[in-house]
Amino acid sequence: MTGVGAADVGAWLRPRGTAVGGAPAQPATASSKRIVAQEGGRCTAPLSLPAPGLSAVRAMIGWDDVGVDEPLTVRVSAKAILLDMDGVLVDSTGLVHKHWSQWASRRGLDASTVLRFAHGSPSREVVARFVPAEEVLVEAAWVEGLALHPTTDEVALPGAHAMLTQRVLPVAVVTSATRAVAQLRLTRAGLPVPAVLVGADDVTRGKPDPLPYLRAAQLLRVDAGDCVAVEDSPAGLTSVRTAGAKPLALLTTHRADELSDALALLADLRSLHVLPAGVAWDSAEDFPG
């Protein structure tokens, strides 16, 4: 992905209005302002700026026409929003750990080693790291079968329902789960299944390959470069960036230093405001880390 420039990322005075789904936007309370800088296409750590910090922002990013006031907000232009499922929409971390630990036990493997690769990639690609090629399909199907068993462990993450039901920008779910598992998890969590859902069985190569996000953008009839994508794993962010989409990350399953390729690190989807021409987040919000 090329660096995000002044045409893509901006700062402006957003009146205290509405966030995703029409909910009131949260007022800024932090004493410092933060903005994410782009250098050579790679995201740097959030930079703390003493209020108002306008000259520093202009010098850092090279804008001559930036207007900043309370609250300082960062904007990214987009025509569509692409969302990972596990860790972004659904809290299924416990289930993922349980199922992969069961599979590790079945194969006589160290569970902690297997779990290092379990987040963000399709089952078949995780399994392929540990078993001979001729056993991959059978073993992946065994893991995926666990996810289809009745359970009550799936819970919608904050902001997920509002993001999926907003009508400002089109939305798609892009997941490393199979289509059947994704539909089941969303339904069990009380979330709507969007018209565009790309599962692991809809593409020949899963995350970290760019194909899942490229396919979702194609189905939405939007160029991938005009999409914002929200992920929670390093593999997912690699998929987003190589597809050319604009990556944001939620700090739900990984540490901040593992998600440094994102334009911003947000607590959950409630921090993301959907606008007619893109998305925004309050840079005055303290980034967890």
Image (spheres, helix red, strand yellow):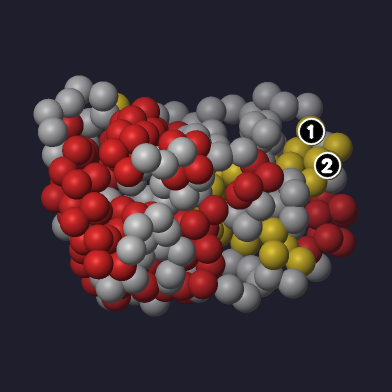
- Percent coordinates x, y for residue 163 in the rendering: 34, 43
Numbered label attached to residue 49: 2
Numbered label attached to residue 32: 1
Q: Is residue 209 left or right of residue 180?
A: right
- Name the image quarter holding residue 34: top right
Secondary element at image label 1: strand
At label 1, the amino acid type is Ser
Give the mark nearer the N terminus: 2 vs 1: 1
Q: Is residue 162 above or below residue 43?
A: above
Q: Is residue 4 above or below residue 163?
A: below
Q: Is residue 256 left or right of residue 237?
A: right
Q: Residues within 10 Å of mark 1 (few under 14, many from 20)?
A: some
Q: Nearer the viewer, residue 114 or 251?
A: 114
Q: Residue at x 27, y 61 (%)?
A: 136
Q: Residues within 10 Å of mark 2 (few under 14, many from 20)?
A: some
At label 2, the amino acid type is Leu
Q: Is residue 105 left or right of residue 10?
A: left
Residue 45 visible somewhere in the drawing? yes
